[in-house]
Amino acid sequence: MALRALKENEVYRRVDPAGFKFASTAALTDLEGVLGQDRAVEAFDFGVGIRRDGYNLFVMGAQGSGRHSTVRRYLSRLAPSEAQPDDWIYVNNFDQPHRPSALRLPAGRANGFAADMKRLVEDITAAIPATFETDEYRNRREAIENRFKERQEEAFGAIGDEAQKRGLALIRTPMGLALAPVKDNEVMPPEDFRKLPQPLREQIEKDIAELQERLQQTMQQVPDWDRERRRDVRELNREITSNSVALSIAALKQKYQDLPEILAHLDRVQQDIVENAEQFLHAEAQGQQAEMSAMMGVEQHSIPGKVALARRYDVNVVVGDQRDPGAPVVFEESPAYNNIIGRVEHLAEMGALLTDFTLIKPGSLHAANGGYLVIDALHLLQQPYAWEGLKRALRTRSIRIESVGQMLSMISTVSLEPEPIPLDVKVVLVGDRFIYYLLCRNDPDFAALFKVVVDFEDDMDHGARTRRDFARLLATLVRQYELRHLSPDGVARTMEHAIRLAGDSGKLTLRIGPIADILKEADYFAGRSDHDLIGREDVQRAIDAQIGRGDRISRRMQQSIIDETVLIDTAGAQVGQINGLAVYSLGPQSFGKPSRITARVRIGNGEIVDIERRSELGGSLHTKGVMILSAYLGARYASDEPLSLSASLVFEQSYGGVDGDSASSAELYVLLSALTGLPIDQRFAVTGSVNQHGMVQAIGGVNEKIEGFYDICHERGLTGDQGVLIPKSNVRHLMLRPDVVADIAAGRFHVYPVATIDEGIELLTGRRAGRRRKDGSYPPGTINRMVHDRLAELSEKRRKFGRPEISGSNGGSRGQTAGKPDERPKA
Amino acid sequence: MTPAEDRHQNVRRILVALSAASNSRSAIERAAALADAFHAELVGMFIEDINLLHVAELPGREVVWGTGEARTTSRSDLERQLRDRADVARRELERIAGARRLVWSFEVRRARLSEVLREAHGLADVVTAELTGSFLALTDTGHPRRPVLAYYEGGACAERLLALAVRGAVQQDVPLIVLIPARSAEAAARPSAEVRGLLRSHKLTWQIERVPPGPAALERRVRRAPGQMLMLDAAGRMMHEGRLAPGLGAGGCQVVLVSPAPADSSSST
């Protein structure tokens, strides 16, 4: 039965604008919810609702499917109704300064506490020096100093007096003290000393030796006296300041009496201030010096004491700055390790890097703690160690700020180890499906930490209800991007484009991104044409322009065929030659291109040589297709005798590699042609894969493939009898370009749906394929009969040809059956 | 301010005498404060005390601060240490004078401290020294709340000495104690009257105290109740009666020698 070419309505599913009951999308309300993603939304609701360990979400779907915007919209709606999490601060750990303490405060109180502490330090910085200025302090301090001095003066004075009595003086040298004889109130010149009588000199030397020993003993006591003095001063300072500090801090303790952690910290602050009271005096002095230096234009390189002291009691608010009410929703756009976990920054001072707890910077986990953190999975995985850091935080349910070097134990220099903060966050990873499956396969932690998968559909069924919803979606996009509204025919054309993007005439794409792009571009063209509404024509221009902007390569390839640099026949008939069709995907665009496939056969051992594979230009799927057709040949035509042909198949002028099995039907047709010597009509191009039973199966990119061959035929001039053979099961995927549809409607170009190889070969050769009769033979003159006979002939020839060859072979084993050596496994 | 007061307070050059035995920073800072107050040039003079160099060639050893260790020190060791100290003193002077934007100079002289102080009136308007000299003084720290002591001997420089002492006391907001050397109350009557006359117009707390004449009595007085500075007439009898007693620097009291006012000084306030 002759194949019927498809009609216009079978190659393009037209959306009837008359079916829309609105004048423009302005009449439509915004779409509530997410179109066609009921299952994903349900999973999302479940994921955010369940508050259990490991129930983090992985939202996956195709690019442009609206995953990010949906997550953003849902969380933004949900979060404000949830409780605002606590604030967190880091404060100095006075016992272990390298391990700053993390303190929790009720939401909204951290900043107030930080300000209170700042004021406290200011008050104390002023109050303590004032305390030290009091007469009481001065007198007591002077008494301590005097006690020390008197002790020294008494001890050294006694030695001095004794020395004076013996005619000696106690001299101060650069490094200490010495005794020397005196003459006329000055040290005796050495020459005078030498002139003294021997006995007198000896007496002086003896006196000096005696007093020197006393001097040594006294001198050795001085450090003890000084220690005692310092201890007394310290005690005095502590006593004097403790009252003043207690007074200043009492009000704060009252204010924060409901927060035991804060009260404990205030106790530690109080104790530390008292113990370091003198620092406040020095700080005051250094502060004045720094101010003077600044006024005089002298550059100050070190942190002035006052500032350093203020930092000691500072409060670093890591969570609590200007937050919106409700649970936080953080979208981390740059998910580097430090941006997620937080970091400890350093100040460069005099060539050294210094840090303290005030330089702890929070990460997005801190900001999202108690709420939601949304991260693009690909961006996360692209950042070194960010994924490891995030997993560790989720696993331990705490945020431990440490550098990558610390995490990997690669550095051992002293740095801060801030106290970890408990973590309660719902992480939402948004990514492509391949990332999800990649992580599932390769990371054992992933499944335990991300138990909820939210899988966004790529498309949805196309029906009356969904058409209405789709139109509302367009209205929503129009309002969102502030575009012109669409007329009904504009909606219809956009919807047709959505069908084409879905790759199935029964479906509409749910990849909102490309649809939004078309709307924006159509709005541009509508503006240029002074249209109030976006109409069909504007949408078409946008689609054409989009293709036109990116079709340089397809045009170059097409031109090379027109120029006959690449050989493609679109007329006549050739033995062992057929037009196959391939799809090229370059960036966002795909296009089809015909390729000449040729086959040669000769006597052989049943091997069909896939030259693409041998030359390492063919992929595994292509090889699989060739192996299937080989099996088909053997099973159908040579089931009871060896397949005694050797055939070679090649994509002529293909240099960039071929994959997929969509050419396997074309390869089978051309092989049959080569076997039978029947020429194949070059007015046709063929696509479709084949199974071992000779059934033609669906392939991808059918629209692009048809359009690719059409473009060549159109360029050369349509003859009215050119066309493409496609798998019958691909008919529902057809959504051809309007120009192709127009020529199909006019009978200038044809698309033939093919279900079996027999149907296809009949069209291609113009000869009946022939059905197998009861005796297993095919009717004479049919293609199948010719193939069968040819294979039998080759088999017979091989049998005859093989015997003498075997007996005459060098080194071969006598008596070996013909063909035996060839039964080794094929590559 | 009267022209006479102006003339007396016109201090153009303040010399700070430094030695290995003194705390150069403290001495320079205090002298610099004075120079700043009087808009005077600050001159640092580091004295390599000959007495100290003699010690190296005499019996006995140096007992080191802190450890009490006794060690032999050669003359070359001492000379090197003095040079080092002089370098440190010079840098301190440069830094401190620079911070106050003072005109300054520095020199090193090998002499006896007492000789330098005796010649002080020829060197500068005011000479300051922490009178540790070669002899013992145990503390270097200043005591800004203590009074200014002025040793009033009368004579050509007396009025200037008093004027500068008043200014120092007012600036520091401390009392002024004028020490009048006299063997009896009668002997002290006339100078006391002079002082009262000179101080009458000044708003500050002041008192007159009679002390027996001579360096030893003055030293005893200072030891009993040190001031923050002791102002002496550089050309007075005290300086002619021999060396200054080391006890004058007791308790960190800064000794300030005031030279007679130049006859042709111009007015400035």
Image: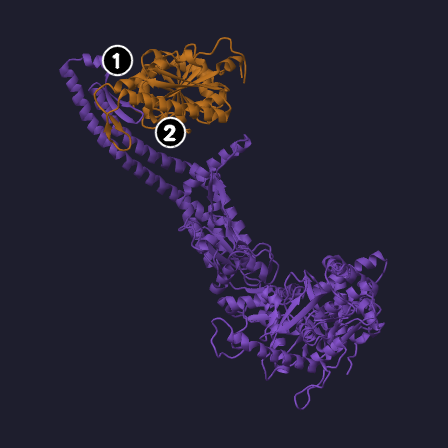
Chain colours: A purple, B orange
List x then y, in percent, for residue B168: 46, 22
Q: Which chain does the numbered disc 2 sit on? A: B
Seen from the viewer's position, the closer of residues A688 and A147 is A688
Q: Nearer the viewer, residue A643 or B235?
A: A643
Quadrant of the frame with the N terminus of chain A? bottom right
Amino acid type, residue under disc 2 in the picture: Thr
SS label for mark 2: loop
State the SS at label 1. Answer: loop
Of all residues, the one furthest to the left in this rendering is A199
Residue A18 appears in view: yes
Q: Is residue A398 above or below residue A354?
A: below
Q: Quadrant of residue A136?
A: top left
Q: Position of residue A55 (x, y in %)?
A: 54, 69
Viewer can see residue A30:
no
Query: The C terminus of chain A appears in which quarter of the rendering?
Result: bottom right
Q: Nearer the viewer, residue A736 or B192?
A: A736
Cβ–Cβ below 8 Å for labels 2 and 1? no
- Residue A57, quarter of the rendered image: bottom right
User: How many numbered circles are shown?
Assistant: 2
User: Based on the displayed image, in which of its 4 quarters is residue A754 positioned?
Assistant: bottom right
Q: Which residue is mark 1?
A: A184
In the image: residue B69, left or right of residue A623 = left
What residue is at 64 percent from the left and 69 percent from the top? A649
Read off the residue under disc 2: B141
Disc 1 marks a residue whose amino acid type is Asp
Farthest residue, direction top = B263
In x, y percent, where is residue B87? 39, 23
**Label 1 packing within 10 angstroms: few (<14), some (14-19), many (20+):** few
Measured Cα–Cα span from mark 2 to mark 1: 30 Å
A311 relative to A61, above or below:
above
Between A131 and B105, the residue placed more toward the observer is: B105
